[in-house]
């Protein structure tokens, strides 16, 4: 068995080789590259059973490499990038190990490789998929808000942004409703909040309300070019303004 390792950090490379030795009973050979340039040279001159790849290399990203060199073997990505890339790899990648990973995480990824490859279910990484992953990485690099600190009489509570269904302005602060229907005071004005939230997930439907796309249950036409929206965890329907309806329709179709 011959493996290519694309990893710019020496300790991470050493951890990968150690896990490979623990997983495979038979001897394995491998090449190691810390750069896109060396990785390209290896791929053009050698055949590999699979590739273990970080995303960020010393002179670029592994996506740049896979865009320029045809890869006909499975790839297991090992990276510290999390939310958006992880979602993308759930549908597009053979396996994705999130750093710092355990030996068990590594074992599961290799077992997935063996299962897919032996059953003939593996499809090569094409340029469309690579572009999806590059787009996800760029989106992840924008630091949108992930949680709010909620101050209550009994202490401090953390509210994860992914759990928020609706945000409503209330003077100099806002009230966030989560998907279970519980409300939380957020000590920011709505104009500041909307700038902190991922625009692919959240939309300001009128002057005082922001909604989360993943909790939309129904959308109904209403008078004067408005839409009524039912959200999970929210009793009353919310409504777009006449001015936002057109952009909202485009947003939900992206």
Image (tube, rainbow, N blue to C red):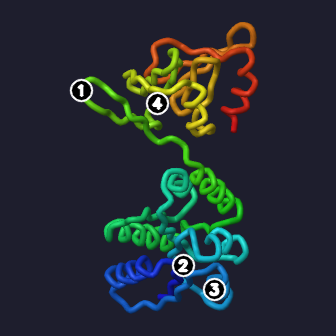
Q: Quadrant of residue 242?
A: top right
Sequence-earlier tag: 2 or 4: 2
Tell me where residue 19 appears, x and y as whole percent. 35, 79
The numbered dot on residue 6 is 2
Sequence-earlier tag: 1 or 3: 3
Q: Give the residue drawn at x 59%, y 49%.
A: 142
Q: Which residue is labeled 3 in the image?
A: 38
Q: Which residue is labeled 1 in the image?
A: 154
Q: Which residue is labeled 4 in the image?
A: 164
Please state if 54 lies on the left or on the right of 154 as rendered: right
Distance between mark 3 and mark 4 Cα atoms? 45 Å
Up the image or down, 27 lies above or below 169; here it is below
Look at discs 1 and 3 and give the one toward the viewer.
1
The numbered dot on residue 215 is none
Relative to the observer, which residue lies in front, 53 or 125? 53
Q: Give the residue drawn at x 52%, y 71%.
A: 54
Up the image or down, 238 lies above or below 114; here it is above
Q: Of all residues shown, which one is farthest toward the left?
A: 154
Distance between mark 2 and mark 1 Cα atoms? 49 Å
Relative to the observer, which residue lies in front, 220 or 18? 18
Sequence-earlier tag: 2 or 1: 2
């Amino acid at each position: 068995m011959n493996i290519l390792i694309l990893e710019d950090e020496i300790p991470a490379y050493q951890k990968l080789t150690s896990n490979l030795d623990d997983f495979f009973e038979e001897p394995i050979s491998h090449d190691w590259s810390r750069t896109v340039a060396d990785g390209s040279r290896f791929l053009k001159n050698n055949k590999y059973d699979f590739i273990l790849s970080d995303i960020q290399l010393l002179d670029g990203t592994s996506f740049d490499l896979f865009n320029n060199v045809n890869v006909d073997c499975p790839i297991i990505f090992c990276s510290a990038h999390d939310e958006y890339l992880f979602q993308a790899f759930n549908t597009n990648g053979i396996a994705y190990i999130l750093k710092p990973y355990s030996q068990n995480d590594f074992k599961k990824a290799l077992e997935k490789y063996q299962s897919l490859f032996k059953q003939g279910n593996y499809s090569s990484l094409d340029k469309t998929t690579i572009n999806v992953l590059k787009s996800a990485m760029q989106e992840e690099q924008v630091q949108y808000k992930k949680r709010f600190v909620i101050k209550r009489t009994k202490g401090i509570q953390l509210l994860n942004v992914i759990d928020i269904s609706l945000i409503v302005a209330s003077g100099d602060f806002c009230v966030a409703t989560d998907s279970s229907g519980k409300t939380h005071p957020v000590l920011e004005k709505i104009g500041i909040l909307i700038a902190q939230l991922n625009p692919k997930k959240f939309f300001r439907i009128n002057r005082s309300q922001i909604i989360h796309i993943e909790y939309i249950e129904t959308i109904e036409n209403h008078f004067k070019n408005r839409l009524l929206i039912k959200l999970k965890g929210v009793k009353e329907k919310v409504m777009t303004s006449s001015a936002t309806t057109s952009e909202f329709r485009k947003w939900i179709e992206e």
